[in-house]
């Protein structure tokens, strides 16, 4: 059977780097295996799901290049969940329970105070028809629990290795709410079964769900997929990431931090694996290097500084065609490959190109602390056309004439030509500045 994986976010917030790492790992796994990648919106939590978050998820994945082969939305599939729930009720695997949340809290608190695990006591299974009729006549509506089999549940996890749970140590999960709506624990299994998902790759916060869901797969007659549970990413201090944590959202990395998608992908594909983190310019390279066996069980930390350093290394390699759109969006419509290649070694973010565009294409107040020397240098400026050899020819002549060398030669020229002490190589900048501006700047004029 061909490999099929899914990324199943709930559209209840912005995707953060931890969520999107799971999307990426699923996507790489599918591409590596020549399989397919499903984007499924787990949107049955109607109070918290929002269309703008669903759009945000699609925008973030598209920005990263994580295209999906199939798309599904749980809210389109209520009819199917009702059908499965009816069958599970008929076979006695779903049973009605009438406890209120307060009553359940009391039961839990009492078990915990006795030092016992807070497992549901199945009191509802002991209700008679008459009890149920009385409860319903009091206006109570049932929620429905799945009756787990008290037997071992085992699987070989692609990240965690052999995993073992005792069915008797798990609480029967609620699959249908009091208002009749199905919950994630059920809908996810029905979808994974119906959509023939072969591998479920998700966060380790779902390990206990998996134990329960394996029994649900068996009960609904679905093939049990292979599971892989990845340790969740934490922030640099070791704190968990939350969907409502705006600063590490993919949207803010893109829109506020100016990070390149391949920087995010290069980092997230390798964080928490045995591979070194290196700049990669295409997802294909990451596919070639991907192997889920390289994912470690240790908790990976996400460090924004590391991302920014990687972003810089990627920019230093990116060809002009890959950034021309971003440069145009910054208002640098006339920027060309020569400009990009001149400035990219000095950038951590594409937006910083604006500063160097101002140096080459807008008036600069030069720093001229040695006017006599600069006048001599100006007199030696070659005629145009200028190219990448002009700087060498010119400074060679200035050196011969003035006897200066090294910093004494170059720094005053840099300060006059750019108004700054540091920056991209002048060999590259000089032809962009042009002779007219260069001459005026050397003469101390703002030009
Ligand atoms: N919507 C669930 C989540 O975001 C999906 C978990 C799963 O992959 O099954 O945690």
Image (spheres, rainbow, N blue to C red):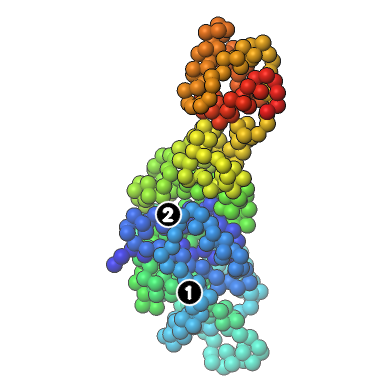
- Residue closest to the eye, 360 or 346: 360
Q: Residue at x 50, y 72 (%)?
A: 73
Total numbered labels? 2
Residue neighbourhood size for the residue with mark 1, other residues' Cα within 10 Å, grouped as few (<14), some (14–19), many (≥20): many
Residue 162 seen from this side: no
Report x, y in % for residue 88: 44, 82
Around disc 2, counting alpha carbons within 10 Å, would you say few (fewer than 14), some (14 to 19), or many (20 or more)? many
Q: Residue at x 66, y 23 (%)?
A: 440
Helix, strand, or loop for circle 2?
Answer: helix
Tell me if residue 186 can be seen.
Answer: yes
Q: Is 325 rendered above or below residue 13? A: above
User: What's the distance in space between the residues labelled 1 and 2, CA to CA?
Assistant: 24 Å
**Relative to the observer, which residue lies in front, 370 or 75?**
370
Residue 392 position within the rendered picture, expressed as x and y whole percent measured from the top left: 49, 19
Residues under numbered marks 1 and 2 in contact, where contact means CB atoms less than 8 Å apart:
no
Residue 415 image point, x, y percent: 64, 21
Q: Is residue 41 above or below residue 293?
A: below
Question: What kind of element bears circle 1?
Answer: helix
Residue of label 1 = 186
Q: Tell me the residue at 61%/17% (across/down).
A: 378
Q: Nearer the viewer, residue 96 or 370?
A: 370
Q: Which residue is mark 2?
A: 25
x, y percentage for residue 4?
Answer: 36, 65
Dot 2 beta carbon under 8 Å from ligand 1: no
Q: For the point 46% across and 55% down, which residue is it?
A: 65
């Amino acid at each position: 059977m061909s490999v099929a994986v899914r990324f199943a976010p709930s559209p209840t917030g912005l995707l953060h780097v931890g969520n999107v790492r799971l999307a990426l790992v699923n996507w790489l796994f599918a591409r590596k295996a020549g399989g397919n990648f499903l984007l499924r919106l787990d949107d049955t939590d109607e109070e918290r799901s929002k269309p703008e978050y669903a759009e945000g998820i699609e925008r973030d994945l598209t920005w990263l290049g994580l295209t999906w082969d199939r798309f599904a939305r749980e809210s389109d599939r209520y009819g199917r969940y009702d059908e499965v729930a009816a069958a599970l009720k008929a076979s006695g695997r779903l049973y009605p329970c009438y406890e209120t949340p307060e009553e359940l809290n009391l039961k839990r608190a009492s078990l915990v105070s006795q030092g016992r695990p807070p497992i549901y006591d199945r009191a509802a299974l002991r209700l008679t028809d008459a009890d149920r009729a009385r409860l319903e006549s009091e206006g109570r509506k049932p929620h429905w629990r799945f009756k787990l089999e008290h037997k071992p549940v085992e699987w070989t996890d692609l990240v965690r290795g052999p995993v073992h749970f005792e069915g008797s140590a798990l609480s029967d999960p609620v699959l249908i709410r009091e208002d009749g709506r199905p919950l994630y624990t059920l809908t996810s299994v029905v979808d994974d079964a119906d959509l023939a998902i072969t591998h479920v790759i998700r966060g380790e916060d779902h390990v206990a769900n998996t134990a329960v869901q394996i029994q649900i797969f068996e009960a609904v007659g679905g093939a049990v997929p292979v599971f892989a549970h990845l340790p969740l990413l934490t922030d640099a201090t070791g704190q968990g990431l939350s969907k409502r944590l705006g600063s590490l959202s993919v949207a803010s990395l893109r829109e506020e931090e100016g990070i390149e998608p391949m920087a995010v992908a290069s980092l997230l594909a390798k964080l928490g694996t045995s591979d070194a983190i290196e700049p990669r310019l295409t997802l294909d390279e990451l596919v070639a290097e991907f192997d889920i066996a390289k994912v470690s069980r240790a908790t990976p930390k996400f460090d924004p500084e590391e991302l920014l350093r990687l972003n810089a290394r990627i920019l230093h390699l990116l060809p002009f065609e890959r950034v021309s759109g971003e440069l145009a969006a910054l208002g640098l419509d006339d920027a060309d490959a020569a400009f990009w290649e001149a400035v990219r070694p000095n950038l951590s973010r594409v937006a910083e190109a604006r500063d160097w565009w101002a140096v080459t294409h807008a008036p600069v107040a030069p720093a001229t602390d040695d006017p006599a020397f600069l006048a001599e240098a100006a007199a030696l400026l070659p005629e145009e056309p200028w190219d990448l050899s002009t700087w060498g020819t010119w400074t060679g002549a200035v050196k011969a004439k003035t006897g200066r060398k090294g910093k004494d030669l170059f720094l005053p020229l840099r300060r006059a030509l750019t108004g700054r002490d540091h920056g991209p190589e002048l060999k590259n900048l000089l032809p962009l500045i042009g002779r007219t501006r260069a001459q005026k700047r050397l003469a101390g004029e703002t030009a």
